[in-house]
């Protein structure tokens, strides 16, 4: 089949690469515009554009999908199917173009975690399992007919970054299986059933650590926002991001937010015991293991509490 692929970030790239390596033909890649990044604010291509250029596949970067010329351009390109992975919300005049429909890869077991941040929500809620879903796009977001689902275990130490990469690879395999089924005319079509839960975009306030919460909840919060955007706290007026922590069997009195240092180890009191902090970053500085962070920490002004 001839495919138009739509995606933007790193999560999309394994699927694009898998489709290119398959028996199907990717005739066009649609992705976001180049954006200024880094200290020099030079225009940088999306991860998907870089992959497409490497494989010499034509790239289209529309600013606004609702513009009439976008649908006109896509209608002029012979394609059987559109495949969408981590892109923007498609208007009906676009997703209705291909004769075989438009499919999407979502990083959850729909209808659980509909929305922009399913990976973070699964870890934040302490789930032991998540997965990926391929489905036909409809007018309402993440509500379409399911084609395939694949379950994926979440380990207790998994961060959002680790789970992101795992789901991207499994998702790529699932999309290829889905496209093969569509090409063979053997497409499963399953209505979404079960409890509907939402996974809206992550806000800054969600990333701030409240040390009065139970240790397990804080650990999940740290895992969910590592490596980006990072769960954070304050030491005086200094912002500190924490990327890895674990429960500590420390029998020391203290109040939530209290800091305790034992040689090369850094601990903080929560609402239910102590956490050991393994990896953290002072604003404007490098990310460091606690062992390397502590010498500089001891030279800072006398603050013994995270807030």
Image (spheres, helix red, strand yellow):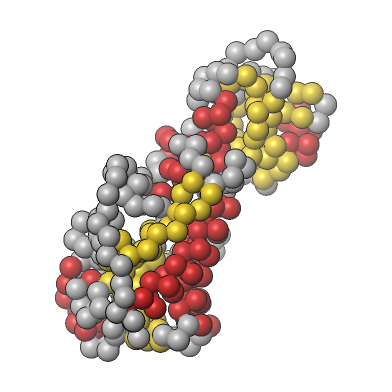
The reply to whether residue 44 is in sight is no
Residue 96 percent across, percent down from the top left: 19, 73
Q: In front here: 29 or 168? A: 168
Q: Is 252 rendered above or below residue 35?
A: above
Image mark count? 0
Image check: 169 left or right of 291?
left
Measuring 16% from the left and 75% from the top, which residue is drawn there? Answer: 68
The reply to whether residue 219 is in sight is yes
Q: In front here: 114 or 34? A: 114
Determine the residue located farthest toward the right in the rendered image: 263
Residue 200 percent across, percent down from the top left: 34, 45
Residue 117 percent across, percent down from the top left: 40, 49
Q: Is 246 rendered above or below residue 115?
A: above
Q: Quadrant of the N terminus?
A: bottom left
Q: Is 307 rendered above or below residue 15?
A: above
Q: In which quarter of the image is the C terminus?
A: top right
Q: In front here: 46 or 168? A: 168
Measuring 40% from the left and 52% from the top, which residue is drawn there? Answer: 108
Image check: 109 left or right of 190?
right
Residue 70 percent across, percent down from the top left: 23, 77
Quadrant for residue 237, please give it. top right
Measuring 65% from the left and 33% from the top, which residue is drawn there? Answer: 246
Q: In front here: 25 or 299? A: 25
Determine the residue located farthest toward the top in the rendered image: 253
Measuring 53% from the left and 23% from the top, which residue is drawn there? Answer: 214
């Amino acid at each position: 089949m001839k495919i138009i692929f739509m995606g933007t970030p790193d999560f999309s790239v394994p699927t694009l690469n898998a489709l290119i390596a398959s028996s199907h033909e990717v005739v066009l890649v649609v992705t976001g515009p180049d954006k200024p990044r880094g200290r020099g604010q030079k225009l940088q291509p999306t991860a998907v554009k870089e992959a497409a250029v490497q494989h010499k596949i034509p790239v289209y970067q529309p600013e606004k999908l609702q513009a009439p010329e976008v649908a006109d351009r896509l209608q002029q390109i012979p394609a059987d199917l559109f495949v969408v992975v981590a892109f923007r919300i498609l208007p009906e005049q676009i997703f209705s173009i291909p004769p075989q429909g438009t499919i999407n890869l979502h990083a959850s077991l729909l209808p659980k975690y509909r929305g922009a941040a399913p990976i973070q929500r699964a870890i934040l809620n302490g789930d032991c399992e998540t997965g990926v879903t391929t489905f036909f796009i409809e007018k309402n977001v993440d509500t379409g007919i399911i084609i395939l689902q694949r379950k994926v275990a979440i380990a207790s130490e998994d961060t959002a970054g680790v789970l992101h990469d795992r789901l991207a690879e499994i998702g790529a395999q699932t999309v290829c299986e889905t496209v093969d089924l569509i090409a063979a005319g053997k497409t499963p079509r399953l209505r979404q059933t079960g409890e509907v839960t939402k996974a809206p975009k992550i806000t800054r306030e969600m990333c701030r650590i409240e040390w009065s919460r139970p240790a397990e909840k804080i650990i999940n919060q740290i895992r969910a926002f590592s490596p980006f955007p990072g769960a954070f706290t304050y030491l005086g007026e200094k912002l500190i991001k924490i990327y890895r922590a674990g429960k500590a069997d420390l029998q020391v009195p203290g109040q939530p937010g209290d800091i305790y240092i034992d040689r090369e180890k850094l601990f903080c009191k929560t609402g239910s015991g102590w956490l050991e902090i393994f990896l953290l970053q002072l604003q404007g500085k490098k990310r460091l293991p606690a062992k390397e962070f502590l010498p500089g920490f001891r030279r800072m002004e006398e603050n013994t509490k995270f807030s």
